Image (cartoon, rainbow, N blue to C red):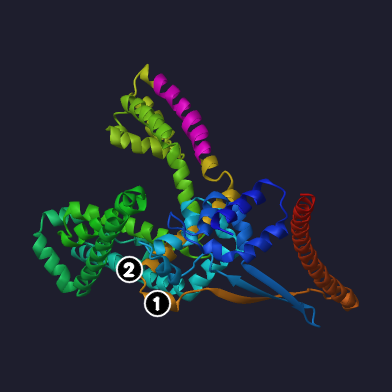
Amino acid sequence: METQGIFELCYSYMFTPISRSYFLVLVNRNRDLLLKVGKENITTMQSIIQKMPKVASEVMNTCIKKSSTFDREGKNIYTIVYDFTLLEPGEELEEMYNLPKGIHNLNALTTIVSSNHVGLLEHPLSARLLDTKWSHFGRRVYVFNLMINILFIVALTAYVLNIEDYFNSAYSKVHLIGLQPSNAFSGNGKPASRSISAFSNSTSNGTVIDDIARNHSSIPILKALILVFSIVNLIREIFQLYHEKWKYFLSYENYFEIALHTSVIAFAVGPGTSSYFWAIGTFSVQLAYIELVMFLRKLPVIGKYVLMIRSMVNTILKVMIIVFIFVMGFAIGFGMQCLHEVAFSNIFLSVIKVIDMMVGEIDYKDVFLSGIQNGDIAYPGSYAVLVILLIFIFIMSILVMNLMIGLAVGDIAEMEKKAKLRRLADLTDYFYNIDKIMSRHLRKQYKIDKITCTEVERITTVDKSNSNECLFESHNSEISSQMQEMVRQFESQRMRLIAMEEKLRFICQNMDDTSTS
C-alpha cells in the first residue's frame, strides 16, 4: 500500500461507515508508511495531523497498548506501553532522507502546534511524551534558567536598594514614628525631605557613585552581574532574529525582552544618580518582575494561571480603544471646569484622574462639591460638571467597568482549559528549541522511543461482606475487556473473509467465461 492508499483509507474512515477495527488493523499493518517522507519534507503522519486531526487521534490510539491483571488484594494493575516513534521518529530517519532542516521537519508535536490543532496535545500519547521529556531533561534546563533569572532579579533589586540605602544615610532617613519606640528620636522627630533627584543635582555624579562604591562593596559585583545577564540575553535575541527572520517580529514577547535588557543596560551603565537614568531603572525593575512572572508559565501547577492572566489582558486590550475614547472625552470635559484642581491641570493628569475615578476614587466632595462651594466652578458650569459626572458614573463606573470584568472572567472553566492547552503548546516549543541546540550525542542519549508505565487501580471497599462481590466484578470486567478484544478480532477476520469471497467469486467468474468460450 502506498502513501496515497493510507490517505484514501483515512478519508474513507472519516466520510464512510468503515469499521473502526478494520481501519486500525490496516493502520497497524502499514505503520512504516506513516513515517514515509513526502515532497513537503514531512511524514505521512504529519500530513494526517494537518488535514485530518480526528483520524490522527485514532492513529495515536494505536500507539498505546494497554493490558491488565488482577491480584487477590483487589488491585487492578495496568501495564501501558507508549510508542512515540510516530510523533518523534528521531535523527536516524532525518539522516536517511537527508532533510535540509533536520529536526525542523519531522517533529509531529510542532506540527500539531503550527497547524493549530492543539487539542491533540491533550491526547494521552502527546501528554505522556511531554511529561516524559519534562522529567528526563526539561525540568533540569528550566530550573537552571529559572535560577539564573532569579539571580538577575535579586542582583537588580539589591543594586537599587543599596543606592536607596546610600541616599537614606546621606539625607535624614524617613522615620515611621508610629512604628518606633518613643525614645528613638531626638527633637521633634520629623523626617527631613528626601529626593534622589535633588541630591544628584547638587552633587557631582562621579563623587556620588564613588561614595556608594566605597560604602557598599557589593555595588560593582551587582552591576557586573546585571550587565552580563542583559548583554548575553541581547546577543541571544540577535541570534534568534537571525534564525527566525521576519517571524521574530510577530511575537510581542521579543519586543518585551529587548525593552527589558536595553533599559537595564542603560540604567547600569549610566550615572545611577541622574533622575533620567533613575526613571529608566524604575521601568527596568518593573519589567524584570513581569518577565519573571511570565517565565513561570511552563510550571505544571501555576503555569496555567499565569497564562490565564495573559489571556485576560489580551481580552481587555480589545476594548481599550473604546475605553480610551470615553476617557479622553471625560478628561477634557472635567478639565474645562476643574482647572483649579491639580489633578485636572493638564490633559495627562486629567486622563490619569479619570482612570482613577473609574475604579471608584471619584472624590466628589473634595474635587467637585468644594469647587462649587468656593466658586471655583461657577454657574452655569457647576450644573454642567454635575451632569457630566452623573453620565460618567453611569457609563464608566457601571457599564464599562462591569463589561471589562465580565470579559476578563466570563468563562473561567473555558479559560482554564485554553490556558492548559497553551501551556502544552509552550512546552512543545520549549523542547523544540532545546533539541535545536543539542548535539547528536545528547539527542541520542535523551531520545525516547517507547516507555512502559504501570498503574495500580485500588478497589476502595471497606465492607468485608462485599469483598467477594467486588472481586467478581473485577473478574467480570476483565472478561468483558477480553470479549471486546475477541469481537474486534472477529470483525477483522470477517473483513478478510469478505475480501477472499469477492476474490474467489472473481476467479470463478473468469473460469466460467473461459469454459464458455
Residue 41, image x and y in percent?
43, 58
Give how far apart the Cα atoms at labels 2 and 1 are.
32 Å
At label 2, counting other C-alpha atoms closer than 10 Å, the crowd grade (few under 14, some 14-19, many 20 or more) is some
Magenta stretch, main secondary structure, is helix
Residue 118 showing in the rendered view: no
Give the residue at mark 2. 154
Q: Between residue 141 and residue 210, name the one nearer to us.
A: 141
Residue at 19% across, 75% down: 217
Instruction: Please report contact status of discs 2 and 1: CB closer than 8 Å, yes or no.
Output: no
Quadrant containing the N terminus in the rendered view: bottom right
Indicate the position of residue 407 as horizontal and vertical percent values.
53, 41
Q: Amino acid under label 2?
A: Val
481, 40: nearer the viewer: 40
250 sits to left or right of 130: left
Q: Amino acid at mark 1?
A: Leu
Q: Residue 337: x, y in percent?
A: 33, 24
Residue pointed to by mark 1: 442
Q: In this picture, which residue range is highlighted in magenta? A: 383-404
Q: Is residue 251 above or below residue 476?
A: above
Q: Is residue 433 magenta?
A: no
Task: Indicate which label's residue lies in the foreground, 2 or 1.
Answer: 1
Secondary structure of residue under mark 2: helix
Q: Residue furthest bottom?
A: 72
Up/down of 446 relative to 16, above or below: below
Q: Residues within 10 Å of mark 1 (few under 14, many from 20)?
A: few
Residue farthest front in this picture? 517
Q: Is residue 317 visible?
A: yes
Task: State the image coordinates of residue 358 (x, y, percent, origin top left).
Answer: 44, 37
